Image (cartoon, coloured by chain):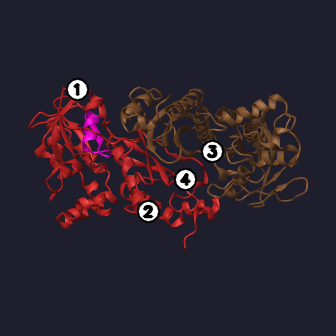
Chain colours: A brown, B red
Amino acid sequence: MSPTLAELTEAELLRRLARFAPPDQLSDDTAALAADARPLLINTDVLVDGIHFSDATTTAMDVGWRAVAANLSDLAASGAVDIDGITVALVAPGHTRWDWVDGMYQGISAALGQYGGVLLGGDCSKGEQRLLSITALGRLGPLRLHRNAARPGDVLVTSGPHGLSRLGLALLQNDPNVRDIALCSTLRDQAITRHQRPTPRLKDVQLLLACKPEHLPWRAGGTDSSDGLLSAVAGLCSSSGCGAVLHNDQLPTAKGWPEGARWTDWCLAGGEDFELVLSLPEAWADAWQRCVPESQRIGQINAEAGVIRWAHNHEPVDTNGFDHFGQP
Amino acid sequence: MSPTLAELTEAELLRRLARFAPPDQLSDDTAALAADARPLLINTDVLVDGIHFSDATTTAMDVGWRAVAANLSDLAASGAVDIDGITVALVAPGHTRWDWVDGMYQGISAALGQYGGVLLGGDCSKGEQRLLSITALGRLGPLRLHRNAARPGDVLVTSGPHGLSRLGLALLQNDPNVRDIALCSTLRDQAITRHQRPTPRLKDVQLLLACKPEHLPWRAGGTDSSDGLLSAVAGLCSSSGCGAVLHNDQLPTAKGWPEGARWTDWCLAGGEDFELVLSLPEAWADAWQRCVPESQRIGQINAEAGVIRWAHNHEPVDTNGFDHFGQP
């Protein structure tokens, strides 16, 4: 059986972790990156056992992958064009098996291999609860996407369907809400993959930069939908002092997504889909949609500060969001 | 009474945290730093309640200050000449009072005000145990200090006395070992300040760069003594494939430090003094010691790989170190 962390000396733990980092990276407490002519983007995200992952639904490899994907998604939603790497702070009880740590770092390596960047060191400590804190570093392209840069008249677009990660979680938990529903196997597979192995939309940012109509300035509102689609739209609106209209016949759902209140809720507030949510001038939105087949137009930005309404009945959309410290 | 974190909405929490960061910094999930011609140094450290701090000995402000100091000390020990800032991941139970969080961020701000850098965002999550994970970013000067760059013939020097932080902890805990010992009040005050408000030795790195004899190349071994003086020396030796000789009549202790086995242990292995431990050619060590009055010569590096001996009797020094996951 795999040893526990308490059974490994610090030197042995470091030796085992070293294979996930570039040669000699872990010999010093700090990492160094060569000077770069582009501004640096920095993002920190923390994932806590029992809140952001659990053994019941997330393998160790998936925990590592998801942690990287969540961070890189934030960098993408700020305009990153290149990933330098990440630092990882790991806290875990002494009885945690090395196998879990090993699998988690394998997931981290796999995601970095896919999207770029290397492990730039980190820290380990004993603690009561497993958790990861990841800081990701990347380079900014010509456009800094800001949450506060939406403008009335913009079109709201997203890079893909929403609710899949929430559905994937329900399927993995054998949730009664999905037990007796006929879902096509493609949708099931897509949902579980989305939950376990989300994709940061770095490529869609490259396409956004490549397709900007020449007459438009480098200004676009942007965020990702890690806390849910509606929360992303609400964030754009409140930071920008704008409002939005959403079209209930343009909800970004996957093919075969069922009808009904629960399914609309999961699409709007399921969270962790890690898609881009962008506020763009119409011509730019059109150009981007031609490049990103999964993208969808979901509404418009207007001047009614802080209010999100449905287009069909002008009723406000209920925007109860995710609360980091509240009770679930 | 101050509200608990569970009683604050996420928006309200963000609003309260915003005053610690530059304007608009927390509006996006990522921070950006302008391009810089110097390489970037990165360091991540995690501080866990009950291991790295406790309410009994550390105020909220001291927790914040110590967290920053620990990170900046690692940057200093790698050759940082400028601090960009830090990200902070905070995990805490929902019943944590806002006052504690506020005090902790005040400590962070005070330390950043003293040593440079700004709050570059971060993340918050509910969790069973309070902890902080800090990633610090700084700029490298002309010399990258490496743990693996010690060479036989080098002199071992440190920027100041050791054991003070451990003594400070003992005094704060009213440890029986220090209850009946006559210690001068200057030493007591110095020890408690060292424990609560350690100083990252960024200035001493600037002096090291300024005083290099022209004929010597930019090569020096370096680390900090966060895990104890002996652990720092052992790290330099094992990473560099060298050994060391220590002089028991040159232990770097503070004025008025008592004699005896316990006091020698605390000097060698107390930890958290955050002094520089450098391996330098003799001429450079001499020049640096003239600039840094608190500095002390503690021994030499030799070719006997992995062995640290006492100079007076050639016996190996016992190097049992701090183990991140083991039982205390």
- Tell me the quarter of the picture where residue B268 sits: top left
Disc 3: which residue:
A52
- Both marks 2 and 4 on one chain: yes
The kind of residue tagged 4 is: Glu
Query: What whole-number distance in Å separates the C-alpha atoms at marks 4 and 3?
Result: 13 Å
Q: Chain of mark 3?
A: A
- Tell me the quarter of the picture where residue B165 sits: bottom left
Query: What whole-number distance in Å separates the C-alpha atoms at marks 4 and 1?
Result: 44 Å
Q: Residues within 10 Å of mark 4 (few under 14, many from 20)?
A: some
* Region of the chain picked out in magenta, as a range: B219-236
Query: What whole-number distance in Å separates the C-alpha atoms at marks 1 and 3?
Result: 45 Å
Q: Is residue A53 left or right of residue B215?
A: right
Q: Report the number of numbered marks.
A: 4
Q: Residue at x 53, y 65 (%)?
A: B97
Q: Nearer the viewer, mark 4 or mark 3?
A: 4
Cβ–Cβ below 8 Å for labels 3 and 2?
A: no
Q: Is residue A318 left or right of residue B144?
A: right
Q: Residue at x 63, y 45 (%)?
A: A52
Q: Secondary structure at mark 1?
A: loop
Disc 4: which residue:
B128
The kind of residue tagged 3 is: His
Query: What whole-number distance in Å separates the C-alpha atoms at marks 2 and 1?
Result: 43 Å
Q: Which mark is residue B60?
A: 2
Disc 1: which residue:
B305
Q: Chain of mark 4?
A: B
Q: Residue at x 69, y 58 (%)?
A: A238
Q: Earlier in the sequence, mark 2 or mark 1?
A: 2
